[in-house]
Image: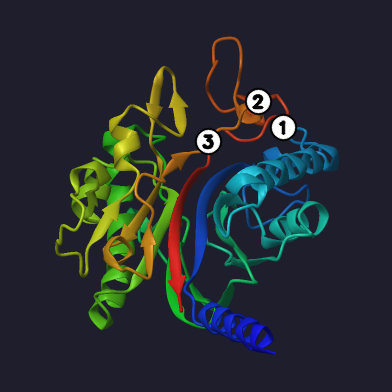
Amino acid sequence: MKKSLIKFSLLFILFYSLSFAQTIDTLTVAFWNQENLFDTIDDPDKRDEQFLPDGDREWTEDRLDIKLYHHARVIRSMNDNRGPDILGVCEVEHQSLLDSLLSKYLKDKPYKVAYLEAPDKRGIDNGLIYNAEKFKLLDVEGDTVHLEGNWPTRLVLKVTLLYKGKDTLYVFVNHWPSRSRGQEKSEPNRISAAQTLRNAVDEIFSKNPGAKIIIIGDFNDEPVNASILNTLRAHPFNCDTVKAGEEFETGGELFNTSYTAFENGLGTYKYRDDWNMLDQVIISGSLLTDSGFHYICNSFEVYKPYFIVTHSGKYKGAPFPTFGGRRYLGGYSDHFPVMAKFIIKSE
């Protein structure tokens, strides 16, 4: 009888301890430029003529299906084959393409899509895929970037998520204007996009300087360019320069987790012989200092499993794209994805 009581007491203590134990979740956030993910249907409001069965790229249902399969393979392989919890994407013609990606090749994953159609005449938009078992979608908004002459471009997509009924997370998905006219001539366009984003961020900070914000995207600029550094005011952040236990002011500030990789010569897009860190993960200061929800130092990664890398020839080491110029290669994308990880602790 005495032994039974002791055994019961130990079990009760164990159960009591476990019921109040701290649980820890690891959150994986990723971004990937999809490289012209078009459907095969002519949209009269968009310049999609190249990406039709009778267009220059001979974009058929078979080729589209291969691309969707390839993208699902990459997504599935992320986060130790569990897939990311949040994935921002750009260069997607319509939400139906992301819906098809999930229903055909990722239907075993608890993913849902947040998306808005943009005024961009190229017909490529930003979107977000998120783990619906962890997040509830609260809101989706799109901020218009006003360029000279009111030229339409991609929206800055703002997605508000609620993590397990507790933490509100603001995720901004970006695809800023390209460098097609040269970096210097096109720079004012990216500065306009950066100012649009900064205004949206400041609106959140005005209500809560400790807001949890993650900014992801293809910025077509690097961490030290004026749009990122001066207009968006995303501070270069190097985990190795922050001493354990050191306190520093982070309220209302942004920090670029991509900076160390950039400083080490890494990149996501190869132009001629130069690597460019165009795809980045930028976070609010609270995600550095909040003990319950914070960035895992040095977890930023340019993600390049062997099967999305070109392994021979002139472009060895670069991403394996769907097209090389106008020539169909059947690859994945001309950009490598990026990832960052966060710890969430809860009682």
Q: Is residue 222 above or below residue 192?
A: above
- The answer to whether the residue labelled 1 contacts the one labelled 2, judged by CB atoms less than 8 Å apart, is yes
**Label 3 vs label 1, nearer the camera:** 3
Determine the residue positioned at 35% across, 61% down: 146
Q: Residue 88 or 131: which is nearer the viewer?
A: 131
Residue 181 appears left or right of 238: right
Residue 280 image offset from top left, x and y in percent: 40, 46
Mark earlier in primary sequence (1, 2): 1
Q: Amino acid at mark 1?
A: Arg
Mark earlier in primary sequence (3, 2): 2
Label 3 vs label 2: CA separation? 17 Å
Classify 10 Å Cα crowding around label 2: few (below 14), some (14-19), many (20 and above): few
Q: Residue 8 or 137: which is nearer the viewer?
A: 8
Residue 54 image offset from top left, x and y in percent: 80, 36
Q: From the image, tell me which residue sits under label 1.
A: 57
Determine the residue positioned at 68% across, 85% down: 4
Mark earlier in primary sequence (3, 1): 1
Classify 10 Å Cα crowding around label 1: few (below 14), some (14-19), many (20 and above): some
Residue 34 image offset from top left, x and y in percent: 60, 44
Label 1 vs label 2: CA separation? 6 Å
Identify the image quadrant of residue 194: bottom left
Which quadrant is the N terminus positioned in?
bottom right
Q: Amino acid at mark 2?
A: Arg
Residue 53 appears left or right of 236: right
Determine the residue positioned at 36% across, 62% down: 294
Determine the residue positioned at 40% across, 39% down: 278
Q: Secondary structure at mark 2?
A: loop
Q: From the image, tell me which residue sits under label 3.
A: 335
